[in-house]
Image (tube, rainbow, N blue to C red):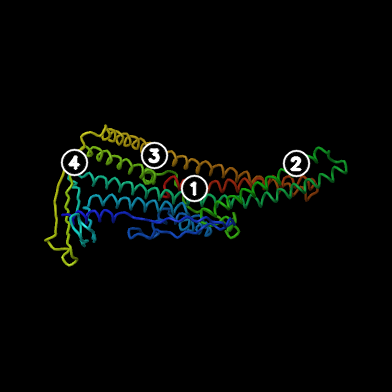
Amino acid sequence: MKKTLAAALLVCMLGINTIPVFAKTSTDNSQKSPKVFKSMVKKSKHQKSDAYKYDYVNIQWWDNFNDSNLSGYINRAIQNNYDLKMATLAVEEYYQATKIQFASELPTIGAGFAPAYAKMPGKSSWDWSFATPAYVNYEADIFLKNRDKTKASKKQYEASQYDERAAYIAIAGAVGATYLNIVRLDKIIELQSKIVATRQDIYNLMLISNKEGLISTADTIRANKSLVAGQTELIEFQKQREKLMHALAVLIGESPDNISELAITPYDKIDFTGVIPEEISSDIIVQRPDYMKAETMVEKAGIDVRVAKKEFLPTINLTGVALFNASTLGSAWSTKGMLGALAAGAMLPLFTGGARVANLRLKKATYERLLQDYYKTNLTAIQEVNDSLVSVKKDREKMEATLKQAELEKNDYAYTQKKYNQGVISRLDLIQVQENLLSMDKLVAQQNIECMVDYIGLYKAVGSKL
């Protein structure tokens, strides 16, 4: 028995880990590049191919813009965006957490080997002892408490998948909207440069007319102010474009320093050919990832309430222990030196300071809160879809009116040009009408891209199910 106790003590001591720690002070204060770390996460067997990611974003829908550059950037974002990588890794975390919880439904088995060289009391010599302890412990889940905990963990895992899908849709929408706004700014910068050149011509002509006494100095000053305002506006457009290019680079996982390598299709070559529905079925709304997540979290909360109720029931454990002990290695596993025990026990906390009651009330309150969030998500989904449909419809109507106005502006310019050719009006009058035409072209480009961004908004509102 003394050898047995000594062996057990040694087993406990073997569980202690000693780790030396060394500190080193760096004396190099020079600038260094960001440190690159190797990922420790390998692709698990449960993970599917990347095809599901393209299903998340409905990659075929993006072909409606007939722009290979835009489709390419959506693809690069799916592969390289760091927010999406984090969303996918979050799913992996919840998957592993579910496996950890499932392990609590299974028995725990342990074994070891502990050689010892010790001098026992009453002995004059040191002796060897070889112990092989083993144990089995199992919580008999007759009330299915651990099973319910695993179900709740699975629901959390499902919710993380909906979060992942929502992240992919959001990033795809952000890439599309950012790209189209860059296209818009390219066109506006082109037109604004022409407007600035036109205002420069107007100012130069007014300077000449002022010297000849045909117009006042006040008119010349106003023309100069208009020129400076146009130049300022052009600089602002250029700044906005630069910032959007930086944002696009980050969205597709590129360095903002490489924006010169990002190709942008000209405005005139983008033609959206998709069919935008006039109304959306409620069946599509309930497929939104946030809606499905809210529903899943309510289901999880219901399971949590059930688990909290089962905490009032006893916990039943079955335990088996075996210890083989011998003075020689050859007889280490003989039945002669075996010590074994089987035990079963039921434990029921009688007083926990009201913790179990409070926990049950907490889970019920959480369930009610998530239920209200589910109701709110339902209403918010309907609102966002309706808002998107209204934006698509009204902006399209506004675009049609603007196109009519632009056509009238073109006719007015053609008529003015004819009068100039006939010598009825001056070149200054012609240039001023030309500036109005350029401003109208800017408005058309602005509203046309707004309509396309509205389509993306509707795409996001219905969870990419267009």
Residue at 34% x, 55% y: name it. Answer: 17
Mark 3 or mark 4, earlier in chain: 4
Classify 241 as above or below 49.
Answer: above
| Front position among marks 3 and 1 | 3
* Helix, strand or loop for disc 1: helix
Q: CA distance from mark 2 to mark 1?
A: 39 Å
Residue count near mark 3 (Cα–Cα under 10 Å), binned few <14, some 14–19, many ≥20 = many
Q: Are marks 2 and 1 in contact (CB under 8 Å)?
A: no
Numbered label attached to residue 225:
2
The image position of residue 165, as x and y in percent, is 40, 50
Q: CA distance from mark 3 to mark 2?
A: 51 Å
Using the numbered discs, state the Cα–Cα distance from disc 1 to disc 4 in whole angstroms.
Answer: 61 Å
Q: Say left or right for 274 vs 309.
A: right
**Residue indicated by mark 4:** 347
The residue that label 1 is drawn on is 455
Q: Is residue 456 left or right of residue 246?
A: left
Q: Quadrant of the N terminus?
A: bottom left
What separation in Å lies between label 2 and label 4 (alpha carbons)?
87 Å
Q: Are marks 2 and 4 in contact (CB under 8 Å)?
A: no
Residue drawn at x 60%, y 48% is 445
Q: CA distance from mark 3 to mark 1?
A: 22 Å
Q: Residue at x 25, y 41 (%)?
A: 307
